[in-house]
Image: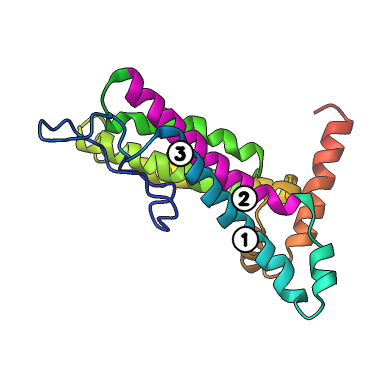
């Protein structure tokens, strides 16, 4: 398939669509070579290893001078990124293979249900920042298609509006649900508030608690 999880980083680029070809020796409708189960398992294990390695590197390297201390600091939560990466690839590839086998041919549209179902992997490593970035990228792609097909008039700034909505969601989370907010938003709000973020956050949450207490 021709889409990536992140169009900028290209962390994961699925296989290109396999079009029907009379000269094609491989009778399988799937875009990969070899058995489907091996293809799914190989991708799941590889990306689980990648995600886990990235997380453990951040945990272990600062304590590399004390190997026992570094190893003892490893916790189950440090495998969440690996589970996220591995499950995403596994689900995505499984759905693509299922649809190819079911329909007897590959198609670019299979990326849509595969990508949506692969989103279940967020259960392993919830991230508001990652989710917002994914939604923004997807909506940008869809809006481009709508502009090209003349479904949306060119004077409607849909990408800009969607960007504002997503950024507003992040600002809302920063002040009312800071435990779910990505760390970079703390630095951003500190910058635009001249370092008064905590004071603003405390005031907003105090007002919110007061409103809830009086039933507003």
Residue drawn where x is 63% and y is 45% of the image: 83
Circle nearer the N terminus (2, 1): 1
At x 63% / y 56%, what residue is drawn?
A: 52
For residue 81, side relative to residue 27 (left or right): right
x, y (%) of residue 108? 28, 33
Q: Is residue 119 inside the magenta stretch? A: no
Dot 1 lies on which element?
helix
Quadrant of the rendering where the C terminus is positioned? top right
Residue 201 visible here: yes
Label pair 2/1, CB-CB below 8 angstroms? yes
Which of disc 3 and disc 1 is earlier in sequence? Answer: 3
Q: Secondary structure at mark 3?
A: helix
Identify whether 30 is placed above or below 160.
above
The boundaries of the magenta stretch are 77-102
- Badge 2 is on which residue? 82
Quadrant of res 39: top left
Residue shown at 48% from the left, 41% from the top: 135
Magenta span: chief secondary structure: helix
């Amino acid at each position: 398939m021709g889409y990536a999880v992140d169009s900028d980083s290209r962390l994961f680029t699925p296989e290109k669509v396999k079009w029907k070809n009379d000269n094609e020796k491989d009778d399988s409708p799937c875009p990969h070579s070899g058995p489907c189960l091996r293809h799914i398992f190989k991708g799941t294990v590889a990306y689980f290893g990648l995600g886990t390695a990235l997380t453990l590197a951040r945990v272990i390297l600062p304590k590399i001078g004390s190997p026992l201390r570094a190893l003892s600091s490893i916790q189950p939560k440090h495998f969440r990124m690996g589970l996220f990466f591995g499950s995403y690839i596994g689900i995505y590839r499984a759905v693509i293979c299922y649809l190819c086998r079911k329909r007897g041919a590959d198609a670019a549209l299979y990326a849509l249900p595969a990508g949506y179902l692969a989103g279940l992997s967020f259960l392993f490593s919830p991230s508001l920042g990652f989710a917002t970035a994914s939604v923004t990228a997807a909506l940008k792609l869809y809006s481009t298609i709508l502009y090209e097909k003349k479904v949306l008039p060119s004077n409607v700034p849909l990408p800009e509006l969607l960007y504002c909505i997503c950024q507003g969601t992040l600002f809302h989370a920063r002040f009312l649900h800071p435990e779910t907010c990505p760390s970079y938003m703390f630095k951003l709000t500190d910058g635009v508030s001249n370092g008064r973020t905590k004071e603003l956050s405390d005031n907003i949450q105090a007002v919110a608690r007061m409103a809830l207490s009086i039933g507003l």
